[in-house]
Amino acid sequence: MVGLAKEARARHGTLAASLTQERIVFGLTIVALAVFSLLLPGFFSRQNLLNLARNVSVLGIVATGLAIVVIGRGIDLSGTAIMAVGAAWAVTLSAGGTPETLALLLGLGLVVLMGVANGLLVAFIEIPPIFVTLATGLLIFGIGQFVLIRTLIVHLPASASFMPLLGQSKIAGVPIQILVAAVVMILAHLFLKYLRWGRFTFAQGDNIETARLTGIKVRPLLVGQYVLAAVIAYVGGILLAGANPTFSISVASAGMMYDVILVVVLGGVSLGGGSGGMSSVLAGTLLIGTLINGMTIMDVSEQWQSLVKGFVLLLAIVLDSALHPRDEETTRQNDI
Amino acid sequence: MSDASPLSLSRLQRYWPSHLVGEVLAKPWIDSVVPMTVMVIVLLIAQMLIPGYLGLGNLVSVSREFAEFGMVSLGMAIVVFCGGIDLSVGGVYALANLAALYLINVLGVPVVLAVPIVIVLGGLLGAINGFLIGILKIRAFLVTLATLVIFRAAVNLLLLNFASQITAAYTENATWDFLGIGKIAGVPTNVVVLAILAVVLHLLHTRSRLGWHIQAVGGARRAAHHAGIHVRWSIFSAYVACSALSALGGLFYGARQGSIGFDTGVGLEIAVLAAIVLGGVALGGGRGSVARAMAGAVITLVLTNVLVRLGVQGGATSTVLGIVLLIAIGFDVKWQKNRHKILQKAYVSPAFLKLHTPPDIKPGSGSPYELNDRLRGAEVLALGLVDGPEDVILDRQGRLYTGMRQGWIYRFSGENFATRELFANIGGRPLGLAFDRDDNLIVCVSGMGLYGVKPEGEVFKLTDQTNRSWFSIRDDSIIRLADDLDIAPDGKIYFSDASVRYDLHSWIFDGLEGRRNGRILCYDPATATTRTFVSGLIFPNGICMEADGRSFLFAESYGCMVSRCWIEGPKRGRVERVIKDLPGIPDNINRASDGNYWLAMVGMRSPVWDLALTMPGFRVRMVKRVPRDEWLAPNLNLGCVIKFAADGRILDCLWDGARINNPAITSMREHQGWLYLGGLTSNRITRIKLDRADPAFVGPVAYWGAPRIAGSQAGQPA
């Protein structure tokens, strides 16, 4: 026992052990910030930094929802579709004369339904979450495009007040978007750290069979996670819809989902489940925000940006796999 | 079976092949039935919705599109076989398309050279995936998601720079056009290429080492690793093959279209994934075939093609594909999970069986089977040293041999058989034993077949398969339950294979089924071949050669009968009943010293059991509705040993009233005035002194004549 304790202390003491992925990413963010500040004129200004944060706040919010699912060893590829379609439907409804509050609540109801659908398919039909959400993502987008909204671009009505307030106004010079993102992340953090279901999510992500055997009701928990992810994505969607007079649901199909996964994986929320937290999401969001901001200032074309993001994503996955190697004992055969 | 009773549905039921349902469900190809049916239905619906859809002209034009899609599906199928997934196929497809057009249009590379370059390029892209997934063991879904992003970004970047160049440099090229729009014997070139590829891949998948390795890795990764398969390189090569095939698809697309757009190959991964899952290729690996992947591709392509023809918007097609994918995967998951449950319920298929009225066994009834307690005084040997001595046999030297549940054969010798030796380790479950002319111990091994042990203990295999019968659905060339044997004077070995439908661990269910599943096989040492000699028997068990060597007697356990089967003369192969109404379930038969035969009974019949056998519907309901451990089972707690004459007269009957030493007797051997008894579930061997027996009788001598090996009479009983 003494030996083990000593060994553990020794391991914790080494520099390598203290280099968690999260810390590395924070470090890289600081390096990137420093480099861009030195090289790019106007980068290190209050205005640009707020801009940077504002630009990635929606990304951070959707990533928060995804992170909760990923911690439970799932994945939600339908997040951006839920975000876009839910918000766009609320906008369409309020443009059609429905009071804004009611429209927002109806939108909330819709995304809860979508989350429940994801959760039921994963928990009860037992389809791997990757396929469930891949398919429901397409399905939700299709329903939005052809049934609920019938167009790709929606216009924010003049009568709307709450959505523009969230999307465009500032408190003490800080855009509300950033504040909302911060609140969502803090709430998610509290949920994961202090609520029973949050702790259970970690247990389930570590080993779902063990979690089930210890008496956790895994199936309702799974459904809850997907609903939570959907609702959080919806909040992001409202921010996005409120930010501009027009809102296109094609954001969902334009590779935003890859960015969301990138943020989550980059920060150290392992896809193997059971590890990471909100600080990881924050780290990933900030690094991606900095990179995108820097590249935009440098006038890098969108194609090059997505190439860079693709490589960073690949790098993040490789890093994740190196730091959290697949546990062959708990890996299920069809875990792909 | 000769009892006259009115014809009823139950009686007719025996002719109804209900057992085939379970056997068909157990076949691996059953998974293909659903996709193939769906394919046919989809094609018919397409014909109904769009008149002339199945016409030759339309088929040719649709099949051109299909060929490219089919190549990518083949690639994806290979990756899925090994338990992976490749989302980057669309990116590779577009890159290959671009590369092919650039090479041929702009650089003027000859087509013959451009094709291998593009395929190698695809292989290299696949090597990236393969390296990350196979060698570094990173999750396939995310790796290929990332490489998809990268490949697509690369395509878009390259297109910005080269699109106008490619379009401007367009020139006529006969070879290139032949690939794109040419025909071979009326069939589009790319379809011919796809057909060849499919056949080759099918052969590689089912018959090559690499194909088997990939299947093994997909089926059970860890087990494959332990079996010495290079898991990492198998996965690596699967991804290389997948990307190479996708690249080929992109190349043909380029040849056909001659141009490139930003949307080339977008969403291809979803469509291809839907295709192969629809075809019944299991995600997660291990199950699937090339043919099924192709069937799935046909379904998906016809589905989207029909939707486009009916004027559905492009975006809606991918929505429909999403739904189809979801349904297909949901069905696949549930099918994989519940298949064995369905099979378990459908497999046991009780048949009608009417046994003859059993004779009375009550004391004082005057029946030859009257209960007595003559085995009570039996001498107990090897108590606690044996585990399930199903058969016992003594050699010329008087040493006692018996098979163990663990797959061993023990030999007991010396004073009171006190010395125990491990004679041989065969594996399987040794059951019936017999000595051949050369003193080799021939053993029926359940689950393995017929084996022999030389006197010095060396094990050799005689046979493990027989001829497969025509129209058998379940492979009946396998010897599942070799039970007992005897050897004819000419050296041919006749042995019973109790059931072609059940293994030893579920032999009770064969009784529950009451079906004629058993057979007697004959191994001919002269030609080293095994043929089925008699089939259609109800759990044939004990076999004993008659003294003249022209026929043998055999017991059918669940038929409660003893019969004679002729092996020589005009009646060769014919079976005639000797005892048709045993009161119990017979097991082994062996010779007695007075020219008669001993028969062991492992359990007794009961009126409830007999009645249930005549009510197949009742047993079907029981099997389907009641948990397995509460099924009705034959009584295997009390048994006896009888002696009968060759004409079927019952001469003697020995019961064990205490039921401690000999609860379920499966075998007995007479040796020098003693009768040795063994039981399938016993932990001891017992022997009893016989009153009017030849004290010089030794089994191998009775069979093969005077001893050829001069040995001491070890183990001589006191």
Image (cartoon, grey):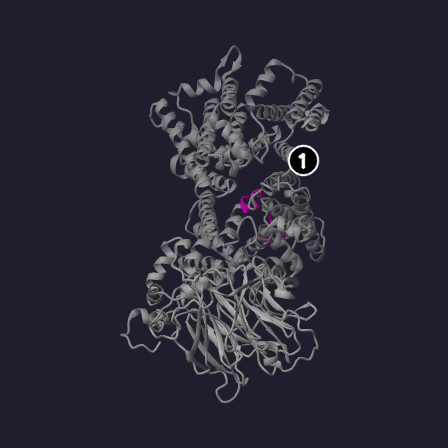
**Which residue corresponds to mark 1?**
A322
Q: Position of residue B682 (x, y in %)?
A: 52, 60
In the rendered image, the residue lying farthest to the top is A172
Circle 1 — which element?
A: helix
Q: Quarter of the image holding residue A117?
A: top left
- Quarter containing the C terminus of chain B: bottom right
Residue type marked 1: Ala
In the image, taking residue B9 as reference, residue B180 lies left or right, namely right
Q: Going 38% across and 64% down the picture, which residue do you hit?
A: B350
Residue furthest to the bottom: B570
The mark tally for this picture is 1
Q: Quadrant of the N terminus of chain B?
A: bottom left
The residues colored magenta run B251-269
Residue B518 image offset from top left, x and y in percent = 47, 71
Q: Is residue B252 magenta?
A: yes
Front residue of B635 and B265: B635
